[in-house]
Image (spheres, grey):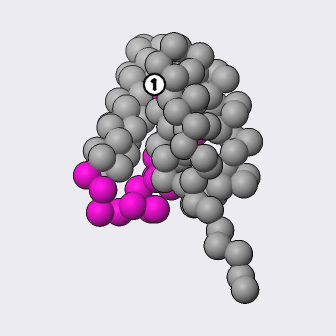
Amino acid sequence: MTEMMQIDPPQGILDDLVSLYDRDARDVVVEEVGKLLEAFPASYMLWKLFGAALMSEGFPVQAEMALKQALDLRPESKEAQSNYAIAQKLLDDLVKAEDADTTLANC
């Protein structure tokens, strides 16, 4: 008999991570979710939380990649589509701002 692989960590762990996120301990969330993703790489919930925490910690490139992974796991999810689109928009805005700064510095 084959053992069924669990996609998500136990609900209690997810609840604890969301609680930490809500209490602005997002650096802890990034660290803990990063570890959990090794054991649960197909967890949409972990990828979504990882992306949100990375974004709020100022890592937009990594956040975009995490949210893309969440979207890949649930392409039909409007939430996943929206989260990824927001991350892409933020990255586009950052690139435009950097380009503007470079242009002004060269004047």
Residue 10 in magenta stretch: no
CA neighbours of label 1 inside 10 A, class few (<14), some (14 to 19), many (20+): few
In the image, residue 58 sits, relative to residue 47, either above or below, namely: above
Closest to the observer: 59 or 26? 26
Outermost residue toward the bottom in this view: 1
The reply to whether the magenta stretch includes residue 58 is yes
Name the element at disc 1.
Answer: helix
- Mark 1 sits on what residue? 98
Tell me the residue at 52%/33% (across/down): 15
Asked if one can make out residue 59 in the rendered structure from this viewpoint, the answer is no
Residue farthest toward the left in the current orientation of the protein: 78
Residue 4 image position (x, y, % from top left):
64, 73
- Could you tell whether 68 is left or right of 35 in the image? left
Q: Quadrant of the N terminus?
A: bottom right
Give the percent coordinates (x, y) of residue 16: 58, 29
Q: Is residue 76 visible?
A: yes
Q: Residue at x 32, y 37 (%)?
A: 86
* 93 to 84, vertically: above or below: above
Which quadrant of the structure image shows residue 17?
top right
Magenta stretch bounds: 55-78
Residue at 51%, 13% in the rendered image: 23
How many discs appear?
A: 1
Vertical position of residue 33 compared to residue 4: above or below: above
* Residue at 37% over, 32% down: 90
Q: Pinpoint residue 73: horizontal percent, then vertical percent.
A: 46, 62
Q: Main secondary structure of the magenta part?
A: helix
Q: Point out the image quarter for the C terminus.
A: top left
The image quarter containing residue 14 is top right
Tell me the kind of residue under disc 1.
Glu
